Image (cartoon, rainbow, N blue to C red):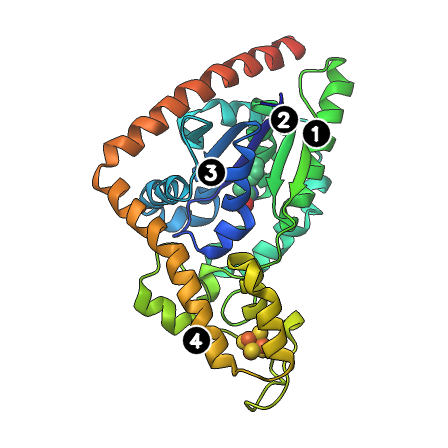
Amino acid sequence: MENKTILSGMRPTGKLHLGHWVGALSNWTRLQEKYHCYFMVADWHALMSEYKDSSSIKEFAIDNVADWLSCGIDPNKSNIFIQSQVPEHLELSMILSVMVPLGWLLRCPTFKDQVKQLKDKEVNTYAFLGYPVLQSADILLYKADTVPVGEDQLPHLELCREIVRKFHLITKTEVFIEPQPLLTNIPRFLGIDGRKMSKSYKNDIALDEDDKNLEIKVLAMFTDPQRKRRNDPGRPQICNVFSSYLIFKEEFKDEVHDWCIKAKKGCRDCKKMLYEIIKDFIAPIREKKEELLKDKNYIKDILEEGRKKAKNTAIQTIKETREALKL
Ligand code: TRP
Ligand code: SF4
């Protein structure tokens, strides 16, 4: 066990899909073998965009945690908890916010993007502007030195590091640790239409997708648009079906590459085989999840354990933070 602390989180705004497994969960399960890990359900972050209809946040929180566990996140190795059950996140967020200039937040590309993209959700709010401040509090509360995130989150990590430096400069203390982002280097797994996989684009494959829908979705996957006829050679390097083989069945990559560039097989056959592969990948996850959701108390007990442990660390950091500010 190396003496490193990892923290990462997901917003419970929907069901998880294969993109979450590729981009985060596969990485988390590996990290928990080596490091001290906190995995958090960021329900307050979810509330910032879902406040008009917040009724499903709680349900998605449990559903997402069931997916984490089914994918191999082990509560004996990782600390799993729900953000809003540890109110110290808000306390630290407020404290940090006093020294964050508005310009840092207004300039944040994610803020500008989301306000434009989530028009009907009206996220041009005070809380949403402070999204990265709360995220910084999440990380700093546990003195995490490493934060596995997607590329889109890099500006938030940089902001967090700036907040740490400013806090230390002002208080002449060294309470916090400047966290480093950890980017996954797994090939990107796009949605079936070739855009980023996202529930809001309706191009996702759920982690517990049933076989019938899975088949429909895999067969609908976007491929090399130049490969119009069966005899046209394809370009695997730009085909999402090919990158899916790299992710889910690496040992087939040479074979698939070969039949693609030489037009030995059609895209439909290529996708049919991929369907079988993903089906076998999903089946045990879906079964385990069904089993887990039969007894919600088991999940609730895990979250209660996680809450207690998180709380202990959080209280300590808040104490140091207040002392640093002579409060
Ligand atoms: N903002 C992250 C996302 O949308 C979720 C998140 C909240 C997070 N708090 C965090 C990620 C702390 C890493 C660390 O993906
Ligand atoms: Fe993509 Fe397979 Fe078609 Fe090649 S044969 S373009 S890898 S789906």
- C-beta proximity under 8 Å, tags 1 and 4: no
Question: How far is the residue under mark 1 from the one under mark 4?
Answer: 47 Å
The disc placed on residue 163 is: 1
Q: Is residue 51 visible?
A: yes
Residue identifier under label 2: 96
Of labels 1 and 4, earlier in sequence is 1
> At which x and y percent is residue 149?
60, 43
Describe residue 122's horizontal placement relative to residue 287 as left or right: right
Between circles 1 and 4, the one closer to the viewer is 4
Pointer 3 residue Cβ closer than 8 Å to ligand 1? yes
User: What amino acid does circle 3 point to?
Assistant: Ala
- C-beta proximity under 8 Å, tags 2 and 1: yes
Between circles 2 and 3, the one closer to the viewer is 3
Pointer 1 residue Cβ closer than 8 Å to ligand 1? no
Between circles 4 and 2, the one closer to the viewer is 4
Question: How far is the residue under mark 4 from the one under mark 3?
Answer: 34 Å
Q: Nearer the viewer, residue 83 or 128?
A: 83
> At which x and y percent is residue 234?
63, 81
Of labels 2 and 1, earlier in sequence is 2
